[in-house]
Image (tube, rainbow, N blue to C red):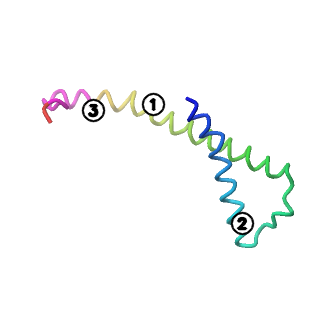
C-alpha cells in the first residue's frame, strides 16, 4: 500500500520533470520564467490526471472481472479444460 502511495506521489513529479526538460530542450520554455506557483500547478494537474487514469483502469478491470471472467470460467469448465490438466 505504501508503494502505491509513493507511486502516486512521485510519478507526476517524474512526468513533470520529463515534460519540462523536453520543453526546455526545444526552446519552448525558459526555466527562469516559471514561478513556483506554476510548477506546483503543473504537479497537481499531473497528479489529478494520473489518479483519473488509474481510476479508469481500475473500473475497466473490475468490470471485466465481474462480467467477462465468470463466463470464461464457465466455458472452460464445460470444455473439460482446467489448470491442473495442463
Residue 51: say if magenta. no
**Corner quadrant of residue 68:** top left
Q: Is residue 83 left or right of residue 52?
A: left
Q: Residues within 10 Å of mark 3 (few under 14, many from 20)?
A: few
Residue drawn at point x = 87 percent, y = 55 percent: 35
Q: Which mark, residue 62?
A: 1
- Tell me the quarter of the image containing the C terminus: top left
Q: Is residue 81 left or right of residue 70?
A: left
Considering only vertical position in the picture, is 44 above or below 33?
Answer: above
Residue drawn at point x = 58 percent, y = 42 percent: 53
Residue to which mark 3 is pinned? 72
User: Label 1 vs label 3: CA separation?
Assistant: 15 Å
Q: Mark 1 or mark 2, which has the lower sequence index?
A: 2
Residue to which mark 2 is pinned? 23
The residue range painted magenta reads: 73-84
Q: Mark 2 or mark 3, which has the lower sequence index?
A: 2
Amino acid at each position: 500500500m505504501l508503494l502505491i502511495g509513493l507511486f502516486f506521489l512521485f510519478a507526476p513529479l517524474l512526468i513533470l520533470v520529463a515534460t519540462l526538460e523536453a520543453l526546455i530542450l526545444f526552446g519552448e520554455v525558459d526555466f527562469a520564467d516559471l514561478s513556483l506557483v506554476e510548477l506546483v500547478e503543473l504537479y497537481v494537474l499531473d497528479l489529478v490526471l494520473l489518479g483519473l487514469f488509474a481510476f479508469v483502469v481500475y473500473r475497466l478491470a473490475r468490470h471485466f472481472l465481474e462480467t467477462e471472467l465468470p463466463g470464461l470460467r464457465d466455458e472452460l469448465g464445460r470444455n473439460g479444460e482446467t489448470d491442473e490438466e495442463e
